[in-house]
Image (cartoon, rainbow, N blue to C red):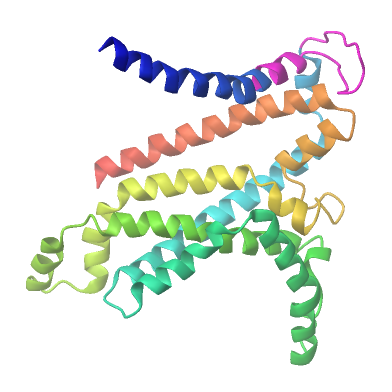
Amino acid sequence: MAKRRIAYYLMTIPALLLFFAFHTFPALQGIFYSFTNWDGFSDGYSFVGLKNFINVFKDENVYNAYFFTFKYAIAATILINVISLLIALGLNAKIKAKNFFRSVYFLPNVLGVLIVGYIFNYLFSNAFTIWGEKLGSGFLSQNILGNPDWAWVGIVIVGVWQGIAYNTILYLAGLQTIPADLYEASSLDGASKWREFWSITFPMLAPFFTINMVLAMKGGLMIFDQIVALTGGGPGRSTQSIAHLIYTGGFTGGEFAYQSANAVIYFIVIVAISLFQIKVLQRREMDL
């Protein structure tokens, strides 16, 4: 047993040290600097207490970033879960080339987010506008990423297209855990497909629905790569997310300590939302 414990320690301690060095320690440093006025470049700094946290609540740019982030996260979470559930139901049916379609729908999850963003940036600015001109549509002939009112829709399209891949796999795994006897019994009772879905499929998928909702919302609240590849936060600041604001202000705007305070607040917000989601959705699982 002593030799086995040594082997376990040799495997876990290096991983723990690496995790602390590259994750926990930088996070603790960020919390420390949030109470200072360090700009990220100077040699010295001084403590300012809660000044940075107070100023965050007075910053109009922060409010705009929060509004866009929540708008995107809510829209993306709903669309990702609805579409991925529909796709999973189709892939779980008795169709030909099932494995081929599963690999096709999972492909977006394999591609890098920045690569997908740059590809869609080209499509929105070139291919789609040409198609719009040929169809005689004034709306389609414009690049929506350059429109302050519609740019967020383009980001939602890209985020949903890539996000449904992972959620589809989880829903598909959940569908395969449902006993076939339940569907056989319901068919004998004369239940319709719609009734089977609401009485058997959806309740049995409740744990997977909870996981997908929490993961999709968390991913939406932390959106960053799509912003960099598609709009850079523009036009103006209409598509600037909290993560993008923290990055640009902290690393290029000389606001390292200020944006560190913003990051601490946002971390608390994400944790609170995730815990609220889990509590509400798990209560729903018990009701079902």
In this rendering, would 179 be left or right of 64?
left
Q: Measured from the top left, where is residue 92 in percent x and y?
A: 30, 68
Residue 122, quarter of picture: bottom right
**Is 48 within the magenta?**
yes
Q: Residue furthest front?
A: 3
Residue 139 visible in image: no
**Is 255 within the magenta?**
no
Q: Measured from the top left, where is residue 181 in percent x and y?
A: 10, 62
Above or below, 121 against 178 in this view is: below
Q: Measured from the top left, where is residue 226 in percent x and y?
A: 70, 54
Above or below, 61 against 250 in this view is: below
Above or below, 89 against 244 in this view is: below
In this rendering, would 172 be left or right of 33?
left
Residue occupying image coordinates x 57% and y 51%:
74
The front one of 199 and 213 is 213
In the picture, the quarter occupied by the N terminus is: top left
What type of secondary structure mainly makes up the magenta span?
A: loop
Q: Which span of residues is magenta-colored?
A: 27-49
Residue occupying image coordinates x 46% and y 32%:
275
